[in-house]
Structures are given as structure tokens and as C-alpha cells.
Amino acid sequence: MKKIAVLTSGGDAPGMNAAIRAVVRTGVQNGLEVYGVPLGYQGLIDGKFIPLGPRDVGGIIQKGGTFLGSARCEEFKTEAGRKTALRALNGNGIEGLVVIGGNGSQTGSYLLSEMGFPVVGVASTIDNDLVGSDITIGVDTALNIALEAIDRLKVTGSSHQRAFLIEVMGRKCGYLALMAAIAGGAETVTLPEIDVEPEEIVKVLSEAYERGKSHAIVVVAEGAKYNATKLAEYFTKHHEEIGFALRVTILGHVQRGGSPSAQDRILASRLGAGAVTSLLKGEYGVLVGWVNNALKTTPLKDVVGKKKQLDMELFELARVLD
Ligand code: F6P
């Protein structure tokens, strides 16, 4: 193998740049030519390959986002789109591809590898819903951003005796919400994995008010049955039972834009380097992840279409500690 390419796909995650840097530098050290593909799978379809050397990826390890750009590419979901991408890869003499991304992106990796192309995925999404990695690139930073927001909202909440509904990202996975709730000492949390009715939250808030708390925090997962906007509508009608005045903060993409934490930079560096090692060993069609404190490869066929299970004991812990 002489030429490999790397792309970032789907929602960006803090640490993607560190992963690209690791792919480029590990590749070059092993005698490979490395090319960056701009804008994810769209760049592949368009046949765009930018030669990258060690100096081209200098000064990016501390930057959030992805300097290659990313996209959710509809065309790559079609067989015609993937065939065009395959022609571009072969036509440019690329012999291996590293795809840094989450669930949707690794579905793309799998489909491309099923067409016979050597692909290795790197587990990267703030949602932490990917089978094949206990923790994915970007999670730690996104979680700490949520935590900082909670800490700040507690301060202003205490001044006004308010309750805050804080909606965090995570798509259909409650990992970020649950961990933010535990680490942020929230009164309660809602998750996609378990239905929590608004009446239960009203009860928790009114009890906290009766106990004399100066503020209350409800962490709401964006994929929960009731998102923050729906809950707020309900609470407006029941504000007398709650006691606290209520405010809503939707963190949204703020969580994705941070400078990667030390943990994310290190994880991304390990996974990026691991992906190149896999390609060099001829181990294709796999996701490189972090499992039980070590690098692990999992066949992409065992990753796609699945969702990592949330440890529900932690949900109980969040309830006990509220
Ligand atoms: O998958 C990462 C993620 O940030 C999810 O948490 C969120 O639901 C989604 O992407 C948002 O997607 P977009 O950036 O396309 O709005």
C-alpha cells in the first residue's frame, strides 16, 4: 500500500483534527502518501484529493471542528454515488481510506468496504452511540461544555430561584444528557431510552422547591419523548405546582464547537494512528475504537445499524443523587 486518503464525515466532533493529524503523520512515517478529502463523502464523489504532509497538519490539534470540512452526503447513500466515489478512489491510485465519523458515516464505510475497497473507520461522534467504542472522539469535550453551562445556569438560577430546562444534543442516545446530569448534580434528567412523563418532573421540581432549594436543573436529552420546548409548554400550564420560575436553554451546536479536551486529543491520536496500522496490516472493513482501555477493531458489519446500550444503573444513580 502506497497511497491512502482520509475524510471526516457527518456531524463534526472536537478531536477530529487530532485524528486527521495522527493519520497523516503515522502514514507518512510508514512511507505512505496521504491525501485529505474535503467535505466528507461529497469530496470523494467529486474526486478531490489534497496531498497532506506532516507540516500541513501542524497547529490543528487544539482546534475544534475539522479542517477538512464535513458533510452529510445524500448522494453517497445511493449506489450510483458510491460507484462514482469508488471510480475516483481507484482513478487516483488511492489504496486505502480512513473515515472519521459516527453512525451514518460508518454505514458509508461499510457499504464502500462491501464494494471491495479497503476502508477503516475511526469512532468519532459526540453522541457516544457507536457500537465498537466505549467512548468516541468528541464526547468528553461536548460533555464538559454541557457541564460548564449547567454550572453557570445554577449560579444565575440561584439568584432568581429559577428552574432551568437544559436541552443537550445526542440524537437518539441519552449518554450526554445522563452524564451531564450526574456530573452537574441535576434534579432530574429525561432520556430517549426511558419515558419520563412531565407530571413526574413537576413532582421532582415542586419537591425541590418545598425543600428550600434555590435552583433546580432538569437536563433534557434532545431525543427524549418530550424535548425542552414541549416540556416548557406543559410547565407553563402547571407553573403554580412547580414553585420555581422556569427558563429554557437549548445548548445545541454550542456543544460541538469547543477546543478538544486532553482526553479527546489523546483518544483521537490513538485511534487515528490505529487506523493506519490496521490498513498497513491489511485489516479492512473495521472500526477502530477504544474498548476496555485498549485499541480494538470491530468489523463494520457488527457496528452499522446498531446503537450502543446506555448503562441504566447510571440512571438510577442520577435519581438517587438528585
Ligand atoms: O450526531 C451529532 C449531532 O450533533 C447530534 O447530537 C445532533 O442531533 C445532530 O448531530 C445535529 O445535526 P446537524 O449538525 O446536521 O444539525
Image (cartoon, rainbow, N blue to C red):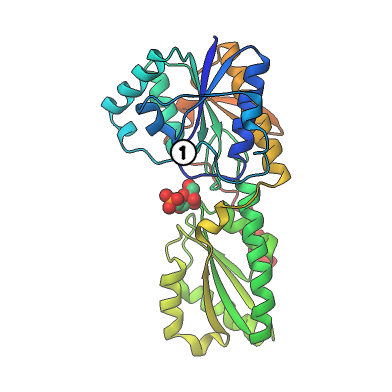
Work out whether 63 lies above or below 57. Answer: below
Label 1 sits on residue: 103
Q: Residues within 10 Å of mark 1 (few under 14, many from 20)?
A: many
Identity of the residue drawn at 47% across and 29% down: 37
Q: Is residue 52 left or right of residue 192?
A: right
Q: Position of residue 306 (x, y in %)?
A: 45, 37
Q: Nearer the viewer, residue 38 or 128?
A: 38
Give the quadrant of the C terminus. bottom right
Residue furthest to the left:
80
Q: Can I make out residue 227 in this image?
A: yes
* Dot 1 beta carbon under 8 Å from ligand 1: yes
Name the kind of residue labelled 1 in the image: Asn
Identity of the residue drawn at 66% across and 46% down: 260
Q: Position of residue 79 (x, y in %)?
A: 28, 26
Q: Is residue 114 left or right of residue 256?
A: left
Q: Position of residue 109 (x, y in %)?
A: 44, 27
Q: Can I make out residue 306 in this image?
A: no
Identity of the residue drawn at 52% across and 14% down: 3
Q: Callout 1: helix, strand or loop?
A: helix
Q: Position of residue 110 (x, y in %)?
A: 43, 26
Residue furthest to the top:
1
